[in-house]
Structures are given as C-alpha cells and as structure tokens.
Amino acid sequence: MAEIRRETGNNEVLFMQLDLGSLKSVRTFAETFLKTEPRLDLLINNAGIFMHDTTEDGLGMMFGVNHIGHFLLTNLLLDRLKECGPSRVVNVASLGHNFGKIDFNCLSTHKETGVCKSAIDMFYIYCNSKLCNVLFTHELAKRLHGTNVSCFSLHPGIIETELGRYSKSLLLVLLKPFSMLFFKNPVAGCQTTLHCALQEGLEPLSGRYFSNCTVRNVYPKARDDAASKKLWEVSERLCGLS
C-alpha cells in the first residue's frame, strides 16, 4: 500500500484484509467494504493459486480460491455495483481454460474439479478452475442483462509471477529458466486486464473473453449455457447463497 501511494502520489489507497480461501473472510470483507465505501465502480477478480490443498471450508484449494471465493465476493457486492453503474466486473482467467472440464460428479463428491494424484493432475485442476472463471462470466453477463453492469473474462498472457510459490511441483521448477526468458513481466501481463477495466465502449461485449486486448471466440464448452447455469447453482450451494 505504501509503495502504491509513493509511486502514484495518491494517498486514497486503502488496505482491507481478504482471504479468498475462507468464506468467512469473504463475508467479513464484503460487510466491511459495504459499510465504509459508498461506491464500487470496478471489481477485478485477479487472485489465483496453483497448489493442491483444502480450504478451511473443505473445498479444493484451487476451486475454492480461484472460483468460489470470487463468486461469493462478486455476488455480495453486486447490488453496490448496480447502484453505481455503469460499472464492471473483470475476471482474470487463463488460456488454460481450454484444457479444463467441469466434472459435476467430482464436485459433488470432493468439492473440487478433479482428484490430484500427480503434477499433471494438479495442472488440469488449475485449468478446470480457469474454465469456471469463464463460465461464471458467461452466466453473470446473462443475469446482468438489463442492468448497468458489464463483465468480462480474459487471458492475461503467460506471466512470470509468484502464482506457484506454494507448490513443490517439479513442473514449475523445470519451467523456471524458460519463464524468466520468455514470459511476460507483470506490467505487460496486466494490460488486457486494464483494457477490460478501462476501455470505453466495451459494454456490448459483456460476457466475452479477451486476450491481448482483443475479444476472442472460445470453444463451445466455455460458453455452454447449461454448464454455466449448473455451475452457478452448485456454487451458490457451496458458498451458502442458496
């Protein structure tokens, strides 16, 4: 927070504690925010984690943090976004969603989108969580139709960040030298997020997916009306909204 204030010269930067791996924390954050901040013009759901574990609510960590935490947060703040429209929700997904699938039987049994027995399983579970981001955006846009709130999902690029800092995956260790040479740095990697957040005139594209600051078509599984509706309903149950 001090660094942002120093670099921007803007002292109106606040810190609020939020752990997306805890439904209690998400609810506490939303309650605090709604009591103290009269406006919400833009919500960027950017958090992501790459590790195999379980949240305090018994959800798979990647599904719980990458999707459910954002799902609950967005829904708790949605009325404020509507009041302050035109406003936007930006969900940072990944090209990895192309490799994902939603196994609703597994979700019902394990509260996770896959069973992790190897590094490659962990990769696919991460991709599944990113497909959840895209499907969530698809369904959210339909539910926001007729309001002054638009939403977008995006692939930020392959970026050299600390996404996998908690993972002991050999795959990440092997990728490290390549990531330093060929991956985007965080400044370059945030440009599509900023485009979706700030570019004027994107409202007619609500629900769409962007990459390199350009709207892109997605595979049918990422715009499946039945799957996105079912994921929404399952997500509501898992985070106590229904």
Image (cartoon, rainbow, N blue to C red):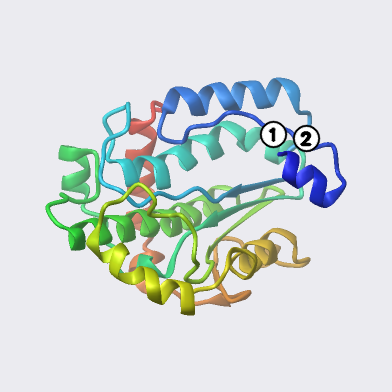
Kind of residue sitting beneath label 2: Arg
Mark 2, residue position? 39
Residue at point 40%, 40% (across, down)? 68
Of the image marks 2 and 1, the number of the one nearer the N terminus: 2
Residue at horizontal 48 percent and vertical 58 percent from the top: 138
> Looking at this view, is 156 or 136 the one in front?
156
**Residue 136: x, y in percent?**
45, 52
- Front residue of this view, candidates 22 and 74: 22
Tell me the tag on residue 180: none
Vertically, is 143 above or below 96?
A: above
Q: Horizontal and vertical percent for residue 27?
A: 52, 24
Q: Residue furthest front?
A: 177
Say if mark 2 contacts mark 1, CB within 8 Å: yes
| Distance between the alpha carbons at the discs numbered 2 and 1 | 7 Å
Q: In x, y percent, where is residue 110?
A: 18, 39
Q: Return the x and y of residue 144 as percentages of the image width and height.
A: 60, 48
Give the vertical position of 139 relative to 23 (above or below).
Answer: below
Amino acid type for the residue under numbered disc 1: Arg
Look at mark 1 in the image and give the residue it sits on: 80
Badge 2 element: loop
